[in-house]
Structures are given as C-alpha cells and as structure tokens.
Image: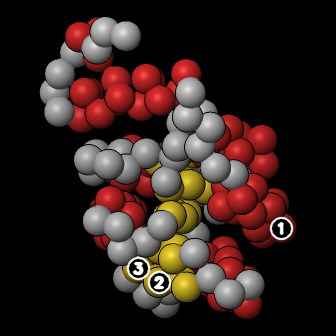
C-alpha cells in the first residue's frame, strides 16, 4: 500500500518510527516535509498529505500532531479527504468501514507509540462496507460542493 505520512514537530518521533515499521512491512511510505523535528505548522503537513491522498498518489494518509485535531480540521478542507481523529483500534476500524476515511489523524501527546502502531494497522486493514454508508458519503460529497445534503433523495 502507498502511504503518505506527515507530522508537525510534536509528532515527528512517532511518525519516524511508524514510517520505519510500515516500510519493514512492505508498504511504500512517502514522508511529507521530512522528519527533522524543526518547528512547523501542522496545516502545511495536512495539506501535503491530504493532497497526496486526494490525487491518488497515496492510498492512505497518516497525520500526527499534538492532539490530531488540528491535522484533521486542516486535512478535511481538501475535497476528497476524509480525515478522522481516532484514539483506539475500534474507532480506526469504524472510520474506514463506515466513513471510508482515507487519512487517520493521531495524537502524539495522548497516545503511546505501540497503540499508534495498532491503530494504523487497524485503519489500514479495514475496508469500506458500502451499503447504507454509501448514501452518507454521497451527502458528504454534496457538502464539499457547497450543496445541501438533504437534496439527495433515495
């Protein structure tokens, strides 16, 4: 799988370790903006990773900042990105199976490295279920285009 990873200075150590783990498992990993630990603003990393995923150059994205919240807000401004802040394996799985999330956002301050690895494994291992969830994704697409989601009729 092609995975794009980005982190601000608070998430750089976790991102570096996660990138190494994913590469060792055979994934193609692209790191956005480098992982040198220099102070940076999370919207820049969210923009880079989000665009890589939205353009199809990556199959999934991983963003790490202090809480994961800022990364999620910024990434979700990009059409085609469905970024979810998750804190455990269940929410990671559900973000994919129900919401077809394509970017997972993690908290470097609140999660340990091992749980982040488990979360990413659960995220990457899950697939969208479709069915009743498909209609909801169509409504999200309407919102992205500035349209009222209630305009979608079954």
Dot 1: element: helix
Marks 3 and 1 close (CB-CB < 8 Å): no
Q: Which residue is mark 1?
A: 114
Seen as rendered, the residue at the extreme left is: 146
Left or right of residue 32: residue 120: right
Residue 40 in the image: x percent, y percent?
Answer: 37, 73
Occupied quadrant, residue 97: top right
Which residue in the structure is indicated by mark 3?
32
Q: Residue at x 68, y 87 (%)?
A: 26
Relative to 31, residue 101 above or below: above
Mark 3 falls on what kind of element?
strand
SS for callout 2: strand
Is 108 on the left or on the right of 151, as rendered?
Answer: right
Q: Nearer the viewer, residue 131 or 87?
A: 131
Residue 129 x/y as whole percent: 62, 37
In the image, is residue 10 above or below residue 135?
below
How many neighbours does mark 1 have within 10 angstroms: few (below 14), some (14-19), or many (20 or more)? Answer: few
Circles 2 and 3, Cβ within 8 Å, touching? The answer is: yes
- Colouring used for the render: secondary structure
Instruction: Specify which label sits upstream in the sequence, 1 or 2.
Output: 2
Q: Which mark is residue 30?
A: 2
């Amino acid at each position: 799988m092609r995975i794009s990873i980005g982190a601000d200075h608070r998430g750089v150590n976790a991102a570096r370790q996660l990138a190494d783990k994913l590469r060792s498992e055979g994934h193609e990993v692209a790191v956005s903006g480098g992982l040198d630990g220099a102070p940076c603003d999370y919207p820049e990393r969210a923009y880079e990773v989000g665009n890589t995923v939205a353009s199809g150059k990556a199959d999934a994205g991983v963003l790490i900042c202090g809480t994961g919240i800022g990364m999620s807000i910024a990434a979700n401004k990009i059409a085609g990105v469905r970024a979810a802040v998750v804190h455990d394996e269940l929410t990671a799985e559900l973000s994919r199976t129900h919401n077809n999330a394509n970017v997972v956002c993690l908290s470097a301050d609140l999660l340990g490295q091992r749980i982040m690895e488990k979360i990413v494994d659960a995220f990457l291992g899950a697939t969208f279920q479709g069915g009743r969830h498909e209609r909801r994704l169509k409504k999200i697409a309407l919102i992205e285009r500035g349209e009222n989601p209630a305009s979608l009729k079954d």
